[in-house]
Image: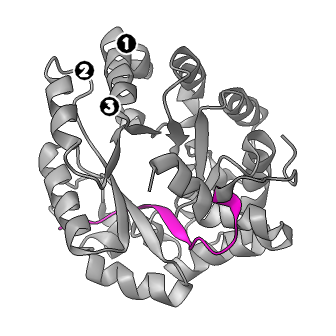
């Protein structure tokens, strides 16, 4: 699909509001949140809805999707409680053990919560890089499809080949690649392997992509918008404007940039695109994908 091709359905109509499709809340626990190391000292504290709302208002963002950062059902309860108290939180991407024999019962339970929109597993941290292709895991994804939930794919570039097989085997499931699969932006060298693999995954029309997390993968102290443009170019060409969505990755982004800097990068990049394409990227696609 051409990046500037005409898009006609309702989710691309201007005026629907801006949605941040990827951010987090947590009450910092140094043991549970050990991934937040000393190099990331700026985010070794609590981040709650009251911290984010002024930033959204300042940036002209109308709502957000909160995504799990802890792999537990306690995390689901915490995020659903936040969403219940704050209308600007439009949905939750939670966590479940997708290989559990009890998965169907848990999915039935979470159907009671209108703001529970999908689930995620932190595949990037698994020693089995092809965990997603295990029969038990794929059975879990088929149950997500049956119960109407989306799935966020959190991987590193070395897992894109497995992801291609994964999404092709489950063509009716809604998938979204988080953080453009975390390419090595800090090296300022865009590899043909990543480009080719992203294109292969994008060839499955059931897969969307979040333009998020880029500053975290860049050189935190010396990144510039120009360093990110080749990566955005690639996903625009691969996915087209009907399957991309904006995500801030706040507060993780704070290791490299504040909220306004993150959103300004993509606002500047897409400034020459049509109003319909911008409306899709900044909200319409997220509403469509997550059934907001």
What is the x, y in percent for residue 80?
21, 59
In the picture shown, does residue 6 fall above or below 171?
below
Q: Give the residue drawn at x 42%, y 36%.
A: 124
Q: Give the residue drawn at x 67%, y 51%.
A: 187
The reply to whether discs 1 and 2 touch (Cβ–Cβ < 8 Å) is yes
What is the x, y in percent for residue 141?
37, 24
The quadrant of the image that shows the C terminus is bottom left
Magenta part of the chain = 11-27
Q: From the viewer's perspective, is 2 left or right of 26?
A: right
Around disc 1, counting alpha carbons within 10 Å, would you say few (fewer than 14), some (14 to 19), or many (20 or more)?
few
Nearest the eye: 22 or 160: 22
Q: Quadrant of residue 198?
A: top right
The mark that comes first in sequence, 1 or 2, is: 2
Q: Quadrant of residue 204?
A: top right
> On the image, numbered disc 2 is attached to which residue?
99
> On the image, numbered disc 3 is attached to which residue?
147
Around disc 3, counting alpha carbons within 10 Å, would you say few (fewer than 14), some (14 to 19), or many (20 or more)?
some
Label 2 SS: loop
Any part of residue 141 in sight: yes
> On the image, numbered disc 1 is attached to which residue?
134
C-alpha span from label 3 to label 1: 20 Å
The mark that comes first in sequence, 2 or 3, is: 2
Nearest the eye: 156 or 66: 66
């Amino acid at each position: 699909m051409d990046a500037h091709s005409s898009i006609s359905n309702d989710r691309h109509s201007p005026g629907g509001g801006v949605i941040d499709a990827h951010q987090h809340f947590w009450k910092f626990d140094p043991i549970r949140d050990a991934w937040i190391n000393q190099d990331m000292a700026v985010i070794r504290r609590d981040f709650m809805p009251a911290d984010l709302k002024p930033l959204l208002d300042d940036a002209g963002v109308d709502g957000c999707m909160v995504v799990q950062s802890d792999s537990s059902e306690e995390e689901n309860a915490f995020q659903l409680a936040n969403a219940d108290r704050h209308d600007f939180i439009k949905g939750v991407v939670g966590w479940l053990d997708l290989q559990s024999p009890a998965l169907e019962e848990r999915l039935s339970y979470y159907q009671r919560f209108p703001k529970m929109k999908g689930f995620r597993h932190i595949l990037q941290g698994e020693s089995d890089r092809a965990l997603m292709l295990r029969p038990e895991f794929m059975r879990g994804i088929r149950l997500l499809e049956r119960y109407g939930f989306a799935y966020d794919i959190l991987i590193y570039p070395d897992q894109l080949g497995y992801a291609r097989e994964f999404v092709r085997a489950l063509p009716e499931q809604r998938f979204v690649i988080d953080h453009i699969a975390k390419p090595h932006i800090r090296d300022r060298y865009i590899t043909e392997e990543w480009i080719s693999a992203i294109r292969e995954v994008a060839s499955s029309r059931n897969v969307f992509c979040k333009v998020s997390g880029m500053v975290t993968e860049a050189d935190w102290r010396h990144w510039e918008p120009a360093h990110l443009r080749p990566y955005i170019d690639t996903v625009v060409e691969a996915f087209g404007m009907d399957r991309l969505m904006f995500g801030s990755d706040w507060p993780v982004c704070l290791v490299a940039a504040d909220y306004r800097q993150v959103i300004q990068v993509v606002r500047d990049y897409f400034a020459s695109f049509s109003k319909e394409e911008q409306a899709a990227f900044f909200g319409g696609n997220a509403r469509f994908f997550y059934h907001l």
